[in-house]
Image: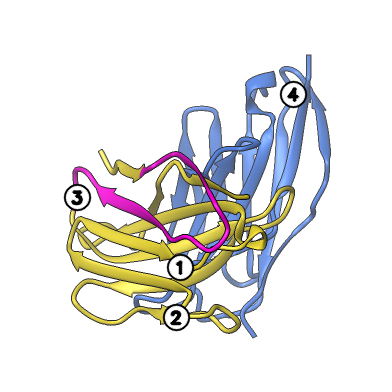
Amino acid sequence: GAVVSQHPSWVICKSGTSVKIECRSLDFQATTMFWYRQFPKQSLMLMATSNEGSKATYEQGVEKDKFLINHASLTLSTLTVTSAHPEDSSFYICSARSTASSYEQYFGPGTRLTVT
Amino acid sequence: QKEVEQNSGPLSVPEGAIASLNCTYSDRGSQSFFWYRQYSGKSPELIMSIYSNGDKEDGRFTAQLNKASQYVSLLIRDSQPSDSATYLCAVKVRGNTPLVFGKGTRLSVIA
């Protein structure tokens, strides 16, 4: 159990375009989902926390107008990187927290974004 | 200030030995503690959770928690080369807040 999927697993886009990443909890309901970014050989960096049906809470330094997060249901959250630039190239990972477990967080497999 | 600290390593152990990974945290109000394994280029995978003082065993893994010392550890018995990865310690302080992650300890198991 506790499977989280992400789509796409990798994407290449041109500078200035937008990219949408989907995160789904497949076998549990997640009231809270988290979006992380990780650059090579660096630590996980929390970008934002999203609760189903409400606005996401962004960490300091993360532009909310650039990284649009929607958490429309208990099993789906999306991250849209708008007007992507090469410096946005990174590994984006979502994580979902089960409402039934003791706050265990399960990670999706990640999406590798390359902006050319 | 909420902080989770781990030795970055690398920690090298021979195959078959016990690997001991340590983590300290600063917030005494922390309630839940987790260990994740992250292989290079992959996302973290939850391997252990522990909520009360003492030991918790799952297969070759044992998590140990000492809230008085604000210390949590992970022991890996009979280490295998496939255990070579970065191990992340994560702490939930209170409520529905995000986990606070340490920077991770890189473990290398030498065959």
Q: Nearer the viewer, residue B2 or A12?
A: A12
3D distance between C-alphas at marks 3 and 1: 29 Å
Residue B103, position as x, y percentages in the image: 70, 58
Left or right: residue A32 compared with residue B56: left
3D distance between C-alphas at marks 3 and 4: 37 Å
Lower sequence index among marks 3 and 1: 3
Look at label 2 and name its amino acid.
Asp
Can the viewer see residue A102 in this picture?
A: no
3D distance between C-alphas at marks 3 and 2: 29 Å
Give the numbered dot on residue A28.
Answer: 3
In the picture of the structure, the residue carrying the numbered disc 4 is B17
Residue A79, position as x, y percentages in the image: 38, 62
Residue A84, position as x, y percentages in the image: 54, 63
Lower sequence index among marks 2 and 1: 2
In the picture of the structure, the residue carrying the numbered disc 2 is A65
| Image position of B5 with respect to A63: above or below | above
